[in-house]
Amino acid sequence: MSWNNIGVVEMTPILFQFLLSSLCVFLLFVFIRFLNDIWWTPIRLQRVFRQQGIRGPSYGFLYGNTKEILNMRKESMSRPMDYLSHNIFPRLQPHLYSWLNIYGKNFLNWYGPRAQFVVTQVDFVKETMIKDQAYPKMDPEWFAKKLLGDGIVTSKGKKWAKHRRLANHAFHAESLKSMTPAMIASVEMMLKRWKQHEGREIDVFQEFKILTSEVISRTAFGSSYLDGKDIFDRLTQLGIIITRNSYKVKLPGISLFYKSNDEIEAEKLDQGLYDSILRIMEKREKESTMSGEVGSFGTDFLGLLMKAMNDADEKNRITAQDVVDECKTFYVAGQETTTTLLAWVIFLLGIHTDWQEKARQEVLNLFGQEIPNSDGLAKLKTVNMIINETLRLYPPVIFLTRKVKEETKFGKLTLPANVHIVVPTLALHHDEQIWGDDALLFKPERFSQGVAKATNNNAAAFFPFGLGPRSCVGLNFATNEAKIALAMILQCYSFALSPTYIHSPVQILTVRPQHGLQVMLQPL
Ligand code: HEM
């Protein structure tokens, strides 16, 4: 036997014991960490909040309050609503509605073992939204990351600032003017399709999906809805998966060992999105080479992103993955939200035909049968009031989230680091203390003197596009698009809700009509 073999034989039990005890120490460490995350930390946080007078439903082991939330939602969503009712808060967020009534304006609830501080007190809402350093965005959940990547909506700090500069540049007022013809051409295409539905029923929700996809494809990416159709389809699939998985709690670390079917599907969709967007980028690169203008990729958003990808200065440069993430973000943000805004405007005008007629008169006075122009769009006062009232009653985004970066003072409260903050936009938009007894009625006249007057200068009463530095970069883009579409529809058609319409608002990323929005179209 060589000395080497003797060594192995003699060392093996010692080595084995060492490895075994190391493994035990490691497992003990993991177990303690796990217990800390799912038990001691939640209990400690709950105590910290209760000592400061903040109450809420008690923490349930591992699941927090998610089982109660899912049950309440199942119950509230089990029936359609009366189509004349806009009381969607108890339907879409029954847990928040009920806990606000029990525990008051600010309370603590539990998303699995994660503490969520829900705030509806207006000064708290403003503080959370405006102080971006103290209350940054949360790290996105696994599925949301597949949808939005590390783009402008999810990123933070310097990276976010760099991407926000690019987006501001692409969507500022002057650029918007140059986008108006593409928006008009997209609406014309839609109205051409509508010719076949005259005197009959049409699902305008589906129509607006195509319209907004066409508009964002043309204006931001120099392509068309059909070019990007596989991208939109994959993003829609991801949106459905995200909604299906919201309030499903995952054990910390479990994804290292096990992937659900939805996770596998989301990964496939993500890869497909990456490949499709890369093809669009390659096409743009080829076009740039063929045009002979080296380094010029066009002036639309994709062009600006690709220019930044090739920037000589490392500080301004972004990666190919950044471009992909930003494209995904803008395909989602540019399409989902405006589709639902347009759908709910048509829904409300389909019921309130007096307001439909007022809006039509305004449009005809300004444009007659001519195509809308940028100057005239700025003068659409009644249409603007209708859009605002629609965004108040049916905000596409019904809650916003942030987190506490480090322990911080919040009024008289001390908030521990890493607690998540939830700002339920819908609760504030429907609050009778802010809007009066008629808060749930459609009354565009509230906005006749502008938003500041309607809200009594309270920025936290109405914020469909968010508030503070992270507010919507596409606000003017979306309102311009909506005004053009509405003006051109009102010029050609009168419409009423179809008897087949079922009023069943659901939240799938945005608040939308579950079974589409069927209206009867009458040519004028
Ligand atoms: C009716 C239409 C729209 C509504 C109601 C809406 C709503 C919002 C809201 C509430 C936020 C803030 C999110 C937060 O604070 O966490 C936001 C952010 C954002 N929106 Fe919109 N949006 C609309 C249309 C658009 C369009 C058309 C685009 C793109 C062309 C867009 C792009 C974005 C982006 C990129 C952000 C992230 C901004 C940042 O974090 O710096 N949105 N939007």
Image: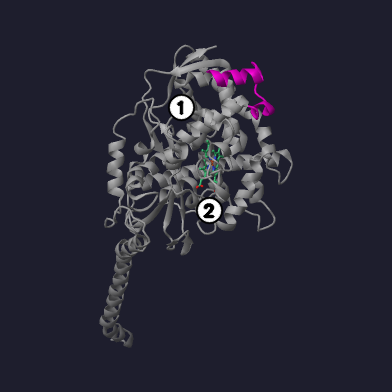
Q: Distance between the residues labelled 1 and 2?
A: 31 Å
Q: Is the CB atom of the residue marked by disc 2 within 8 angstroms of ligand 1's nearest atom?
A: no
Residue 180: give x, y in percent of width and height. Answer: 65, 30
Left/right placement of residue 331 relative to residue 266 reads: right
**Which circle's residue, 1 or 2, is located before the other in the chain?**
2
Closer to the camera, 317 or 397?
397
Residue furthest toward the right?
292
**Residue linked to disc 1:** 205
Residue 101: give x, y in percent of width and height. Answer: 34, 45
Q: Give the range drawn in magenta.
A: 357-379
Residue 404 inside the magenta-drawn segment: no
Examine the rendered structure and indicate whether residue 496 appears above or below residue 277: above
**Residue linked to disc 2:** 155
Residue 74, by quadrant, is: top left
Examine the rendered structure and indicate whether residue 18 appears above or below residue 523: below
Residue 372 inside the magenta-drawn segment: yes
Q: For mark 2, does the 10 Å Cα neighbourhood hold few (<14), some (14 to 19), or many (20 or more) residues? A: many
Label 1: element kind = helix
Inspect this view and state whether residue 299 appears.
Answer: yes
Q: For mark 1, does the 10 Å Cα neighbourhood hold few (<14), some (14 to 19), or many (20 or more) residues? A: many
Q: Which colour scheme is used?
A: one colour
Give the residue type at disc 1: Phe
Q: Main secondary structure of the magenta part?
A: helix
Give the residue type at disc 2: Ser
Examine the rendered structure and indicate whether residue 390 appears above or below residue 499: below
Residue 24: give x, y in percent of width and height. Answer: 27, 73
Residue 398: numbered disc: none
Label 2: element kind = loop
Left/right placement of residue 336 relative to residue 172 reads: left
